Image: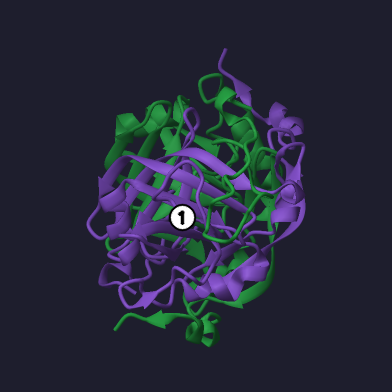
Chain colours: A green, B purple
């Protein structure tokens, strides 16, 4: 734990009458969980390379943009050089294969033949046939942070198969993606359905006060 | 589906001898799944406000940065004005409450009394007592995209309770977060453990060719 992350009790005055003495501060490095586990693909010259990444998110509605944050690794070099990358979503059947892509560096091993690779419309965004969903992205913005680069890419194509779709869109029960928790470093399947979004909160609406 | 998202077969020449005729392109708007569901907090003047957000990711290792992408909503106005925000991780017990925060706008209703609110070291990053984990963030960079703003914040504190920790860090089995899938708009619990990260891939290492 960092030096400035010593446990710290919440002040008693907080929240008016409420006293939350049970709350403790564990510092900045607690991570967010659960993180979606993907494989980011890029070209190292003519060679396809893949890296296990869980720092990934949709970031813009229209046009559709995805963001990935990459540290100082071979894949990052490839994205910088080509301006293209892929985001491949593995199923739980590919846990070990995905994990391996985070254990070894494309600077030291050739990963290009490990998966079956295909391409959509971008020549520098290698896609993995074994992954149920694979997006090809063109970099529209790069954000420099102290340790990582965030690549923001427009999704120019999403490749999948009929067997993973319901009503024309990927079905999470068919794709069977998994998530990563840190710092315990475990992979987890998606579990039971616990609610319907933009729906289940409606009955609670009367608890809020209208400002209008 | 967008006009440029008509289904499209992969070209036959891809991947050398491999022909992936089963792959189809469903366009750019397939989303990534599963997305971690959180509540982003900000102040609207003196009033705490919260928004349901699933476009969130860790983006830098040291210092610890988190990124959230927000559309044109009250919460975004609050973050722009104050330079601070919170990321609150709800448990599955809070599905309906979380969902409500995505159904109604802080421009139309007062959400400040819906949860019990407390503060850490930042006065403009309202934290939710009912959420097992709550991070307070100071904006270090804002990225403008066509529809959304990405706020990159340094995590200056993570507030939790002893009962959610194992070895001093949040335990996903105790926090019980949930994820959002789109476009089916469903919430899902975290399921069974399917692997150990930075570990399970080791036995497959011999399948790769060393470059050294």
Whether residue A46 appears in this view of the structure is no
Report in which chain the residue with disc 1 lies. Answer: B
Kindly indicate the quadrant of the structure image that contains residue A143: top left
What is the tally of numbered marks visible in this picture? 1
* Residue A69 falls left or right of residue B6: right
Report x, y in % for residue A26: 62, 38
Dot 1: few (<14), some (14–19), or many (≥20) neighbours within 10 Å? many
Report x, y in % for residue B75: 35, 61
Residue A114 vs A122, above or below: the answer is above
* Residue A9 falls left or right of residue B98: right
Kindly indicate the quadrant of the structure image that contains residue A139: top left
Between A151 and A130, the one nearer to me in the picture? A151
Residue that badge 1 annotates: B126
Residue A212 vs A150, above or below: the answer is below
- Residue sitting at x 57%, y 35%: A27
Whether residue A20 appears in this view of the structure is yes
Quarter of the image where the C terminus of chain A is located: bottom left
């Amino acid at each position: 734990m960092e030096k400035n992350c010593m446990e710290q009790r919440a002040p008693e005055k907080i929240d008016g009458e409420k006293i939350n003495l049970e709350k403790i501060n564990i510092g900045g490095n607690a991570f967010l969980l659960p993180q979606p586990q993907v494989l980011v693909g890029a070209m190292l010259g003519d060679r396809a390379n893949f890296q296990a990444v869980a720092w990934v998110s949709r970031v813009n509605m229209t046009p559709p943009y995805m963001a990935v944050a990459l540290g100082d690794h071979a894949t990052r070099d490839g994205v910088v050089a080509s301006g293209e990358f892929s985001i491949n979503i593995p199923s739980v059947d590919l846990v070990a294969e995905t994990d391996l892509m985070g254990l070894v560096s494309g600077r030291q091993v050739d990963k290009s033949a490990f998966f079956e690779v295909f391409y959509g419309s971008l020549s520098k965004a290698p896609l993995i046939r074994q992954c149920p969903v694979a997006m090809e992205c063109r970099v529209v913005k790069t954000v420099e942070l102290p340790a990582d680069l965030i690549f923001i890419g427009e999704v120019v194509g999403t490749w999948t198969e009929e067997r993973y779709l319901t009503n024309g869109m990927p079905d999470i029960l068919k794709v069977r993606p998994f998530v990563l928790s840190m710092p315990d470093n475990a992979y987890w399947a998606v579990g039971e359905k616990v609610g319907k979004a933009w729906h289940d909160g409606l009955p609670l609406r009367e608890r809020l006060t209208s400002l209008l």
